[in-house]
Amino acid sequence: MYTVQEELALEERMVIAGQQRFNLQNERGEALGETSYAKRLLPAHFKEVATAFEAFVNGSGAARYGKYRRMMKSCSAEQLALFTLREIFSNFMKQRSVQVTALNIGQAIEDEQRFSKFQQQNEDKYRVVLKELEKTRTKAYSHRHAVFTITANNTGQAWEAWSIHDRASIGMKCIELVCASTQLVELVVETRNSKPVSCIRPTAECLSWVEKHIDQASMLHPMFCPSILPPLPWDSINSGGYYSPRMRSRMPLVKAHSKEHTSMLDYSDMPRVYAAINAIQSTAWEINGKVHDVIKEVWRKNLRVGMPPSEPYEIPPAPVEREKKKADMNPEELLEFKAWCSQAAAIYTLERERVAKCYQIVQTLRLAAEYREYGVMYFPMHADFRGRLYSACTDLSPQGGDCSKGLLRFKKGKPIGAAGEKWFLLHGAGKYGWDKLSFDDRIAEVRRHNQAIIDAANDPLSNIAFWGNADKPWQFLAWCFEYAEYMQHGTAFVSHLPMSLDGSCNGLQHYSAMLRDPIGGAATNLRAASKPQDIYQQVADKVKAKLEVTSDPLSAAWLEYGIDRKLAKPPVMTLPYGSTRQTCTSSILAHIMAHNRTHFGQHPFKAALFLSGILWDSIGEVVVSARTGMAWLRKVAGVVGKQNKPCTWTTGLNFPVYQKACTVDVIRVKQTIYGKTHRVNFGILSDQIDVQHMRSGIAPNFVHSLDATHMMRTINVAFNEGIEDFACIHDDYGVHAADTDRFFNIIREEFVGMYTDTNPLEKFKEEQEKNLEVVLPDIPASGNLDITEVLNSEYFFS
């Protein structure tokens, strides 16, 4: 058992690691003027500086400035302000000479005018150069300047270069305007190498703010890692979790987005919420050493099991010549070009995600090695504004991906016993991918693959073809190791793994329950059946049937590709959480790129766009009630938003949910030299509600508050009955095999209790009407589903 002093020392290292990461990011951003303090100061002073430039350029005064006013007029006041402030913030703390800063500002202003003219005169050439620069992903101004200058010269562009005197004079005037309109910087004379040098430096007031900001900001982003002592129990929104005051201050119970929500939370009596969080975070975990050893080898040898691909995604060549303008394209070429642009954007997103996943694997393995030495760990928990519970640690946690989950197991083991044997075998079947079969058939599959499972446990790398093809390969491998021991010791075997019980498209389960929808209820296993109902396969079957009677050539290509539940799953699963036709297209494209990126040649996006319409319509035919309920919620949120009010409601455990989205003022300034539009966000929320944002957010937020309530109700009852170790992720619960039999029933009892006690939609309507003093539309009509059927549904959570 570790001491409090050792825990405090660990948390201090988390703070220091966060400071080091913050300082490194600041150092990298210094040369580009993209430090954390620059990002705060620039929008804060942008308007006043732009106003000063506007007044100068359009004003009158000393004759010597007339020339410079004319030279600067081709740029907007916003552009001039952005060029100047960014250059000033570049190397802000190094007191660079005024001469260098002024020349760079003057150069940027000249470049903006010259290359804007170059773009107007040579649009095709400009686009070619810009695309080549984007491939290099360089942010260095000097490099971009050099490339554009050489290209402009080679095309014979007529441009009379500004003199050094003119650049410096314009730059000096820009610096002078910033000094006069703000308290950001001042001009001073320093002695360097026995010579006086004019420098630009932050004012004492600004320097004090920056130093305070850096000191505070570096403390605001600690590396949230597991603790080695049970986290402090929560008894208020600011008391619990980590031990040190600094870590607790950065991880309150709820990261509320407004003072109003914080106040509501402060005054809410919600002991059952605290009890559930405390039960989950008191679970002791340890690193599964056998899995850890295999993962390290697979990663080192790039064997690609349950990990992102090592090869980057490549954007295919454009379907038309790069020099060709849109105006010169025929309709077919234009259509193909637009499709290619969308495809390129989607592939670029996939590549960014691939890089992020690689980084995640490295971080996960680093933490696993560290905590393997500790021998025990706990995960402090907190809630989001809807009441959903999350681990404070994201790099390694029971809520992570397959790799992260496979690396973890309960510290405490329990003999599986006669009652737990069934659940132990079903868990392995589920992780392999046999979870769409009946319970008996799942267990039969395990028995049929008995030798392959034991071989995988005895020599994982030699048998990677078997376990590596599992749906969740790392969790399955962790189970294989235990299965091999179970075969030796029988029901006396001591298991350390949580047995996973996962809801069947849980968001749709909640919508079907609250609207008593018998069709949706059957499709999502709210009703008893001899085998699990697969809503994803139902949608896939409808899509396949439609393709078979469609004459479009892409229909045949898709039938050859194969329409299965894995293709249909992402858009169906995310429907209750606000997915759209566009996200449906993106998920189909991601499936193509991951499984058979060459099947549709150079047109995978066109194929994805074609199928998304058919798939989207098919979803609506299977889950009618969910769309009806979501539409009603969006309508209510629109009414509330138009009253300029937030949507607030209270869950069944008295947790107050607060949804408020306001409009944000954004100034967009285009810099041609960078070839893209830079959006400067002032970060100042208006007092005006963003109605569209409110409408789009209400359906996912409402259903998330319901699944959070169900999970906490379930945890509390189970804990009171003596179940102490939990692995919970919103709609995926796990306890020891020995405890699963009872836990299986508690999940169902609490779900039925939720929807017997009250109608969430009716309660939501009443709360909005009380807050607004208006009459809202009636809730959608309910069907005839008997909610108590859930009690007898084996596959509701399985």
Image (spheres, rainbow, N blue to C red):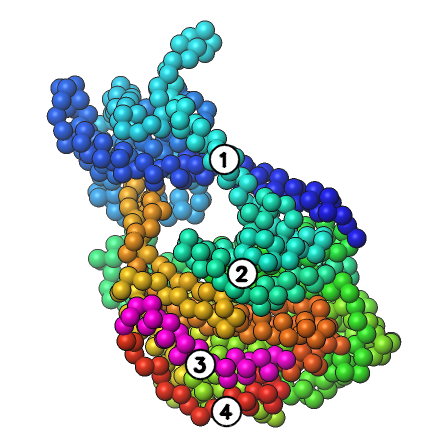
Q: Which amino acid, mark 4?
A: Asp
Residue pointed to by mark 4: 786
Q: Please tell me in which quadrant of the rendered image residue 375 appears.
A: bottom right
Query: Main SS of the magenta segment?
Result: helix
Q: Earlier in the sequence, mark 1 or mark 4?
A: 1
Give the class, few, some or many, for how many residues have Cα within 10 Å of label 4's Cα (few <14, many ≥20): some
SS at circle 1: helix
Q: Is residue 634 visible?
A: no
For the residues labelled 1 and 4, the Cα–Cα distance comes to 59 Å
Give the class, few, some or many, for how many residues have Cα within 10 Å of label 2's Cα (few <14, many ≥20): many
Residue 214's mark?
1
Q: Earlier in the sequence, mark 3 or mark 4?
A: 3
Instruction: Please report contact status of discs 2 and 4: CB closer than 8 Å, yes or no.
Output: no
Residue 759's mark?
3
For the residues labelled 2 and 4, the Cα–Cα distance comes to 32 Å
- Residue nearest the observer in this picture, 685 or 564: 685
Q: Which amino acid, mark 2?
A: Ala
Q: Which span of residues is magenta-colored?
A: 746-774
Q: Please tell me in which quadrant of the rendered image residue 731 appears.
A: bottom right
